[in-house]
C-alpha cells in the first residue's frame, strides 16, 4: 500500500458539456482543478489520467443496446429524439458524448482499481458521481453511471462487500437500481425528500430486493434541512450501518447541491457542513474499510461560489492535508474566476459556520421534529433487516 492519494484527472473531462444554457456547466470542473492547484495540493496527491472505460467495462452495468444508442447520438446528436433518455432537456445529445462519458467513467473505475490493488489508499474523481444513469438509459444529466461501474469493477476484482454512501441532494437512484438485488453492495443515500425533488424516489421503504433486503438505505430529508439536521441524520444512520457491514472499500458521492446557494434544490447546508461530512467519510473508511476510500463528485450548480471550494476540501482531506476553513483563497484563482466567468469568487474556504454543531442521535430524539421523523423512518425500515436496533 503506497498510502498516497490519487487524484483522477484528464483535462478532456471538461468536454462533458450539454450546452451553454444547461445548469451542469463544465466550468465547475475546470475551476475546481485550478483551485486544487492554487493550494499546492498537487504535491500531496498523484495526479493520474486513467483510460476511458471500454465496452466490456461499460457492460458491467449498462445494456449493450443503450451503449450503442449513446454512440449513435454521440456521432449524430441531431438523431437523438428522446429514446433511451437521450436528446431530452436534461440530457441533450452532443458530439463526442460517448467518448467523454466513457472517459469520466474510466476515471472512477481507475480510482477503484488503484484503491483495491493498493496503489493508493484514497482516490478522488470529482468529475464523477453521475449517479442517475440507469442500465438502459440516461437520466438527470448522467449518461454512464461511473459510481456503479466503479463498484461493479470492485466486485469483478473480488470484493465481497462494498459500501456506497451518497450525500448528493438528489437520490442516488441509478446506483441503487444497479445493485438492488446484490447483497454484496450496501447503498446509502441521504437526499431531499422525493415529494419535493427529482427523481421522486428514495423513500425509506425502498430497502432492496427480497434476496438483498436491507441492502438499500434511504434517508429522505425534509426541504429546508440545514447543517445541524443534515449532519445529525448522517451520523444517526451511516456509522452504525457501516460498523455492521464492514465494507472492504467505501465509495462515497459528494454532490455539492445540498448547499443553500444551489439553484436546483431546497436544502440549506453550508460548505462547512459538507466539509464535516467529507471528513466523517474519510474517518469511517479508516475505521471500517482499512482506509480504502473512493470519493466522487456529483451534482452542484453553484458553479463558482460552492463547487470548487467543496471539492477542493475533499481533495485536501483525501490527500492528508486538510484546508482550514478560515483559509484565504489565493488571489490568482479569484482573478482567474472573474476573467473566466465575470463572477466574483468567494474569499475564504468557509461559509462562516465552522465548527458545525449537531446533536448525536444517542442523546435522544423528538418524535414531533420532521428531521427526526425522517431518521426514524429509515432506521425502522432498514435497521431490523440488518440485525440492528431501530
Image (spheres, rainbow, N blue to C red):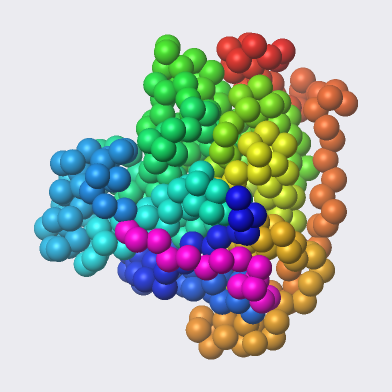
- Residue 72: image x %, image y %? 13, 56
As rendered, which of 45 and 323 lies closer to the eye?
A: 45
- Residue 288: image x %, image y %? 68, 34
Answer left or right for 367 relative to 135.
right
331 magenta-colored: no
As rendered, which of 301 and 321 lies closer to the eye?
A: 321
- Residue 259: image x %, image y %? 63, 54
- Residue 173: image x %, image y %? 43, 36
- Determine the residue positioned at 55% across, 23% down: 204
Q: Is residue 377 above or below residue 332?
A: above
Residue 169 in sight: no
- Determine the residue positioned at 70% across, 41% down: 286
Answer left or right for 382 relative to 388.
left
Taking the view exactly as shown, the residue that stands out farthest to the right is: 363
Residue 42 in sight: yes
- Determine the residue positioned at 52% across, 68% down: 47
Amino acid at each position: 500500500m503506497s498510502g498516497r492519494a490519487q487524484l483522477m484527472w484528464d483535462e478532456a473531462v471538461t468536454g462533458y458539456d450539454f450546452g451553454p444554457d444547461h445548469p451542469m456547466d463544465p466550468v465547475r470542473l475546470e475551476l475546481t482543478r485550478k483551485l486544487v492547484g492554487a493550494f499546492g495540493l498537487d504535491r500531496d496527491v498523484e495526479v493520474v489520467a486513467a483510460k476511458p472505460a471500454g465496452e466490456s467495462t461499460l457492460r458491467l452495468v449498462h445494456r449493450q443496446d443503450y451503449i450503442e444508442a449513446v454512440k449513435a447520438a454521440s456521432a449524430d446528436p441531431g438523431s437523438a429524439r428522446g429514446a433511451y433518455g437521450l436528446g431530452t432537456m436534461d440530457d441533450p445529445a452532443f458530439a463526442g458524448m460517448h467518448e467523454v462519458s466513457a472517459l469520466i467513467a474510466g476515471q472512477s473505475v481507475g480510482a477503484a482499481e488503484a484503491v483495491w490493488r493498493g496503489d493508493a489508499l484514497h482516490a478522488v474523481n470529482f468529475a464523477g458521481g453521475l449517479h442517475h444513469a440507469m442500465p438502459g438509459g440516461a437520466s438527470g444529466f448522467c449518461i454512464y453511471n461511473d459510481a456503479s461501474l466503479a463498484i461493479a469493477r470492485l466486485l469483478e476484482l473480488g470484493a465481497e462487500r462494498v459500501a456506497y454512501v451518497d450525500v448528493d441532494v438528489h437520490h442516488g437512484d441509478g446506483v441503487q437500481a444497479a445493485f438492488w438485488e446484490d447483497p454484496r453492495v450496501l447503498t446509502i443515500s441521504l437526499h431531499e425528500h422525493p415529494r419535493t425533488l427529482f427523481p421522486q424516489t428514495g423513500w425509506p421503504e425502498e430497502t432492496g430486493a427480497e434476496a438483498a433486503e436491507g441492502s438499500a438505505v434511504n434517508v429522505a430529508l425534509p426541504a429546508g434541512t440545514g447543517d445541524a439536521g443534515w449532519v445529525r441524520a448522517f451520523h444517526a444512520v451511516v456509522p452504525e450501518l457501516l460498523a455492521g457491514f464492514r465494507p472492504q472499500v467505501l465509495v462515497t458521492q459528494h454532490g455539492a447541491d445540498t448547499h443553500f446557494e444551489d439553484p436546483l434544490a431546497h436544502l440549506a447546508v453550508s460548505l462547512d457542513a459538507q466539509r464535516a461530512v467529507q471528513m466523517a467519510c474519510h474517518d469511517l473508511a479508516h475505521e471500517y474499510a482499512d482506509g480504502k476510500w473512493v470519493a466522487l463528485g456529483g451534482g452542484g450548480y453553484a458553479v463558482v461560489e460552492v463547487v470548487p471550494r467543496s471539492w477542493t476540501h475533499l481533495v485536501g482531506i483525501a490527500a492528508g492535508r486538510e484546508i482550514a476553513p478560515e483559509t484565504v483563497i489565493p488571489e490568482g484563482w479569484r482573478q482567474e474566476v472573474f476573467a473566466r466567468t465575470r463572477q466574483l469568487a468567494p474569499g475564504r474556504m468557509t461559509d462562516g459556520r465552522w465548527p458545525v454543531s449537531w446533536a448525536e442521535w444517542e442523546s435522544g430524539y423528538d418524535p414531533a421534529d420532521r428531521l427526526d421523523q425522517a431518521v426514524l423512518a429509515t432506521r425502522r425500515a432498514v435497521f431490523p433487516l440488518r440485525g440492528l436496533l431501530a
